[in-house]
Amino acid sequence: MSTLTVSVVTPDGPVLEDAFEMVSCKAESGELGILPGHIPMVAPLTISAVRLKGEGRSDRIAVSGGFLEVRPDKVTILAQSAEKPADIDIDRARMAKERAERRLQDKQADIDFQRAEMALKRALNRLNVYENNF
């Protein structure tokens, strides 16, 4: 089966560069499935898992927003942050989730609720990617 080269890059450097048969991710406009030969496009990504399938394996990467660029033979993901399951500090992710939930439950006026909601989404995404890979 033909493959796509997939590159995941963050401001801290490359996270992944490998060949896969399919890429599934969540853009702001909805779920995308990309196969080799896909039409060129650019789409903003949400906080979600990027699912990569190839050679009988399935990989996941937690991304915290960014952009997806698709060419017929290559997919590039420029993410604000991206982590493979093995790189996720699960204890830190659990603490971030608990901290964000506490902030959202507090009804104090000085809490930035949008920031707390985004932190909760990032933590839940990291936990989901970690737990569904091991």
Image: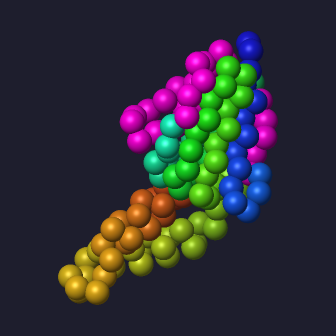
Location of residue 82 (image quadrant)? bottom right
Q: How is the image coloured?
A: rainbow
The reply to whether residue 108 is visible in this rendering is yes
Rendered view: 47 above or below 97: above
Give me the residue at 42% from left, 78% from top: 99
The reply to whether residue 101 is visible in this rendering is no
Q: Position of residue 71 (x, y in %)?
A: 66, 25
In this view, the residue in front, 36 or 41, is 41
In this view, the residue in front, 91 or 2, is 2
In this view, the residue in front, 52 or 32, is 32
Give me the residue at 68% from left, 55% from top: 10
Number of numbered discs on residues: 0
Q: Is 45 left or right of 22, judged from the image as shown? A: left
Q: Is 7 left or right of 49, judged from the image as shown? A: right
In this view, the residue in front, 61 or 89, is 61
Q: Position of residue 40 (x, y in %)?
A: 60, 24
Rendered view: 109 above or below 46: below
Q: Position of residue 11 (x, y in %)?
A: 69, 60
User: Which quadrant is home to the N terminus?
Assistant: top right
Give me the residue at 64% from left, 67% from top: 89
Residue 122 is covered by the magenta coloring: no
Rendered view: 99 above or below 70: below
Q: Residue furthest top?
A: 1
Task: Name the magenta segment's main secondary structure.
Answer: strand
Q: Is 17 left or right of 100, judged from the image as shown? A: right
Residue 36 is covered by the magenta coloring: yes
> What stretch of residues is rendered in magenta?
15-42
Give me the residue at 62% from left, 35% from top: 69
